[in-house]
Image (cartoon, grey):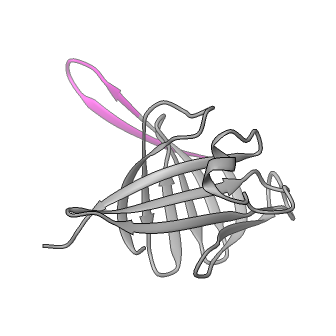
Amino acid sequence: MLGSWRGLEVDTHYIRGEWDAFFGSNNLTLVTPNGDVYVFLSSRVCYQRVVLTHSALSLTLSLSLLHSLSGNVSSDTMNLNIKITSGPNTGKTALGIYEVDFGPVCTFLTWAVSNPGVPSPPPDFMSAMNSTTATVYVFEQPKPQ
């Protein structure tokens, strides 16, 4: 799962737009369609909002730290979970399931994750699609040449 991925939220209450994810060996970075950036490190989670503004004369990048959270990302062969250790939802865990599939030119990652505090991960992807307590994402990554 290492590397950069582009994707969409695909459940019935999806947020319109493209999501970006980067899975490192000890971190996960998610960029939402509206530009919010979530950086999950091995023991800390930072939430940042990146704002791009454009005028006829200049392009300005404004980066402001809005929240600080702490959390731990864990995964095994079927689950990808985020335990929140400080900030909003402290002590709660977002439990998720994932699957990696291989197409002719891209690798696909499907991730269904429960809202923080829901006691179990989604039972399967189809159940999560219509759930009000889970979110489903599909990411793709080009295969190496």
Q: Magenta span covers which residues? A: 52-65
Q: Is residue 49 left or right of residue 126?
A: left
Q: Is 21 located above or below residue 15 in the figure?
A: below
Task: Tell me, yes or no, whether the highlighted magenta stretch contains residue 61.
Answer: yes
The residue located at (67%, 76%) in the rendering is 43
Residue 90, given in percent of the width and then of the height, sits at 85, 60
Q: Is 137 located above or below residue 94 in the figure?
A: above
Residue 30, given in percent of the width and then of the height, sits at 50, 55
| Quarter containing the C terminus | bottom left
Query: Hey, which quadrant is residue 121 in on the image?
Result: bottom right
Front-lying residue, 130 or 57 = 130
Q: Is 141 located above or below residue 1 in the figure?
A: above
| Quarter containing the N terminus | bottom left
Residue 98, given in percent of the width and then of the height, sits at 56, 66
The residue located at (58%, 48%) in the rendering is 136
The residue located at (64%, 72%) in the rendering is 79
The residue located at (51%, 67%) in the rendering is 99
Task: Tell me, yes or no, whether the highlighted magenta stretch contains residue 70.
Answer: no
Residue 83, given in percent of the width and then of the height, sits at 75, 68
Q: Main secondary structure of the magenta part?
A: strand
Front-lying residue, 136 or 81 = 136
Query: Hey, which quadrant is residue 112 in on the image?
Result: bottom right
Q: Residue furthest top?
A: 56
Mark count: 0
Q: Is residue 129 left or right of residue 60?
A: right
Front-lying residue, 122 or 7 = 122
Front-lying residue, 84 or 50 = 84
Q: Residue furthest left?
A: 145
